[in-house]
Image (cartoon, coloured by chain):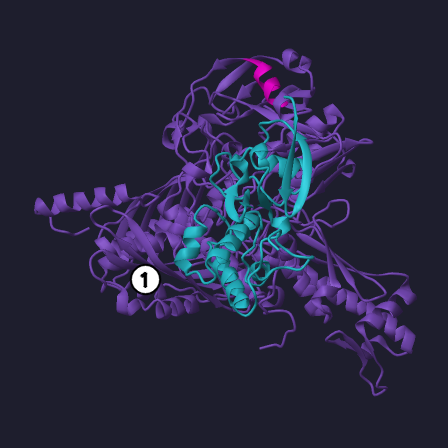
Chain colours: A purple, B cyan
Amino acid sequence: MAEFSVIGKRLPMVDAPEKVTGAGLYTDDLALPGMLVGKILHSPHPHARIRRIDTSKAEALPGVRAVVTGREFPNKYGILPIGHDETAFAVDKVRYIGDNVAGVAAESEEAARQALALIEVDYEILPAWFDAEETMKAESNWIHDEKPHNIEKEYHHNFGDVEAALAAADVVRSERFVCPEVTHAAMEPHSTLATYEGGRVTVWSSTQVPYYLHRTLSNVLAMPMEQIRVIKPLIGGGFGGKSEVCPLEVQAACLARKAGAPVKITYTREEVFYAHRGRPQQIVELTMGATRDGRITAVKARIVQDGGAFCGYGPVTILYSGALLGAMYDIPNLQFDGYRVLTNKPACGAMRGHGTVNTRFAFESLLDMVAEELKIDPVEIRRRNLLKPPCLTVNQLRVTSYGYPECIEKVAARARWTEKKGKLPFGRGMGFAGSHYVSGAANAINRSEMPHTTINLRAEADGTVTLFTGASEIGQGSDTIQVQLVAEELGIDLERVKLVAADTDRTPIDLGSYSSRVTFMAGNACLEAARNLKKKMCEALAKRWGVPVEELESRRGRFYHRNGTGKSMSFEEAAAVSIEEFGALEATGAYSPPKEAQGGKFKGAGVGPSPSYSYSAQAVEVTVDPETGQVKVDRITVAHDCGRALNPITVEGQVIGSVWMGLGQAVQEEMLYNQGRIMNPSMLEYKVPSTLESPPVDCLIVESIDPEGPLGAKEAGEGSLAATIPALANAVYDAVGVRITSLPITPEKILRALREKEKKKAAGNGGAP
Amino acid sequence: MTKESIQLKVNGQRYDVAVPPNKLLLDLLREDLRLTGSKRGCDDSSCGCCTVLVDGVPQLSCVMLAASYQDVEITTIEGVARNGELTPLQEGFCVEGGAQCGFCTPGIILVAKALLERNPNPTREEMAAALSGNLCRCTGYEQIYLSIEHAIKKLQTAPLEAVPGDD
């Protein structure tokens, strides 16, 4: 293994000190002189036409400086080029309870709230759609006129010959899985501060995607991008919830421009729930065919995704749900029918494990059912269906590094699978599952030849280096990883690399923190920038020493003349010489995914391809109380293949955090709706797991050094989430013999299933599933 | 609303501020004293991000009327490090990864500080019980326990950190 100085070490995050002292500033911590409070009037109706809005009373209220409604900023936007269906405020129609009707900027929160109450809106109530299957049958009152039957997008993919393979299979199993909506619940509520000064708009915002926000503001405000600056302060967690432009980000800018003063909007927690953009409800109907010896021969999936009132990332979500049926196991025949539909509920979007999580729950559950029917051990059936990389899957995903087999073996050994599976007393059980995720999307949201990331480096005469990156640290440690990579490649101390990040006036473009892309893409760009910097330094030294540049080399922060002159120079000295020779010492690196990783040519082929995939295997051990149905998770063992672990502390933090978030979705999290109204829009009622519900997680790292990742690294932040849910469902089955196919796996569902099983037994139907 | 003058002692320092009687301590800290380390993460006192210590006891500043806390010692996250030097607990959160996004971190460090002052060698169960009112959405709590255990180890060879103002 290569020797590294700062790579692979357990290093604290570069921004940890400011986080443990309270000195670090998040958006809501910022204040400017004359700053106004922005508040939003939300729709009380799920679907209604706006006949009239009268803001005159609100405008007349002392302390109110601006009131804005939809018609003033009618330009449509959306994260996807095919989905521009949102406006800063509703124009003519509201589409969900919580939709944005008007905005107020006032000198105090009290005045802003009073002003909201004084805005008169005359609504014409329309029939509303809440159910994913029902909404597709709608013949009128469509949520968006241009989307007939409330179908946002549908995709039909067919690879190989699924019907023939199913007809020839020794065993075929089908099951319907229901996964309700869950949401990110990042601890920091969204916040945006906007100013309008000298014809320029500056926006500080809790965003994972400063570049997309920059573009969207330009569109909504009808101002050129150069007149807009976006700055990302510290972010209190994202998980996808800040990975598309949220209404408040454009609303604050609209209000600031109209008021001519700084305006800050910070969502209440209830508003965060209604802004949502979380994981959609999905109904996954899955069929799997296999041979007698456990080889999967065909998989067929029909997925209906309830997307809420706007497009958002929806088409990407549904495409991931189908595409990433591939790249995990060797599946020769694959069919996917996906529907992303519109309902009168808050829009869904990207959430950690984007699109892959519910399908993986279904797949790994069904695989266990097939294994049981064939009397094959669940771990063994997974071994029998492995890919043989490097390979192209049937749906044209290119798989290079593949640490899944090692993940399986490590977890099985550590969790003592063979001793425990099927051998624990009634009420206790162990389940197994795998999952995977992309290391960044191979295709950008807005297709162009522009690199996905660009990094600039500037060295000073004292040898310090400033790293300019557009990438967004959101708590996952990406700033730290970039600093580590630059320090490693240049051979200098970590402390010598200063960081300037995510400020569109100062940093080059990075597409953002989503699809687990930053380590892979910005990381590769960091390495290229550092190599280019060294190349320039070699050129300067060659000139100074009067030797051919080919005879120079750099190792560990020192430059050498190879051909016997014995000349050498430290990084600091060489930086000074370079600046003397060239006037400045700067270099750029960029990254674009290779063409061969960009997938097929069919409709929807753009989503799913990645330069590399991470892999995860997990064993979950549970105790189920058959009297109450209560599940206690005793321990989770996870192995995650992240390529080279650039910093094991951040890898473990990401992997354990993912597992834990999967656990929440598995047993307790769910957005509850009644006629479009969220019934649990608070931390108290939504109930993310507290310390008391959080089991120990044993985290193992598998390093399948990736051929194209930065020093062999790939993603660590999302891929482990999905496996937790089916591993837990499989463990419940092992413990008490009931198969729960709808999430969350609550005591009520377990008890109901146990009683039904008892009834069947009593009726003499036997215990066969 | 009319304002009244109140006196508070925060991180060992006295402050005179004129605030409306309904002003919450969290808002006073953040807006009037510009001590923004205490965070607001929810609407219903369920997340723990706004935790401060009142005479060494963790309390939620989002449900405390500022005017009612004039005769006590209030400690916020800004008052934990002494002379710019991180305490073993803060150091633990750096080296063991207990702070990811960092938003819950101030509250969690203050609760852990109070716990260690009352029980210098808590078990994982005792830590979980103490922190059950502080939500973290990043870590799954594992690295938070490791961070606290780093401090426990370090404090066993060094005197316990004192509450500012106690000396």
Tell me if I can see residue A119 in this picture: no
Q: Is residue A500 magenta?
A: no
Please provide percent x and percent y for residue A423. 22, 65
Q: Is residue A692 left or right of residue A504?
A: left
State the image coordinates of residue A701 (x, y, percent, origin top left): 48, 67
Residue under the point 8% across and 47% down? A764
- In this view, A648 is above or below A672: below
Which residue lies at the image location 83% right of the left edge and 88% below the top edge? A564
Task: Name the side, left or right, on which A429 lies relative to A114.
Answer: left
Residue A758 rendering spot, x and y as whole percentages: 14, 46
Quadrant of the frame with the C terminus of chain B: bottom right
Q: Is residue A555 left or right of residue B86?
A: right
- Quadrant in which residue A196 is drawn: top right
- Front residue of A243/A543: it is A243
At a point 59% along the width and 69% down the height, the residue shown is A9
Tell me if residue A117 is in the magenta stretch.
yes
How far across and how far down the image is residue A551, in percent?
82, 79
Seen at 35% across and 43% down, the residue is A743
The range drawn in magenta is A112-121
Give the structural element (helix, strand or loop) at label 1. loop
Q: Which residue is mark 1?
A: A295
Q: Is residue A372 above or below residue A201?
A: below
* The N terminus of chain B sits in image quarter: top right
Q: Chain of mark 1?
A: A
Task: Name the amino acid, label 1.
Answer: Arg
| Residue A95 appears in the picture as rendered | yes
On the image, which quarter does residue A67 sit in? top right
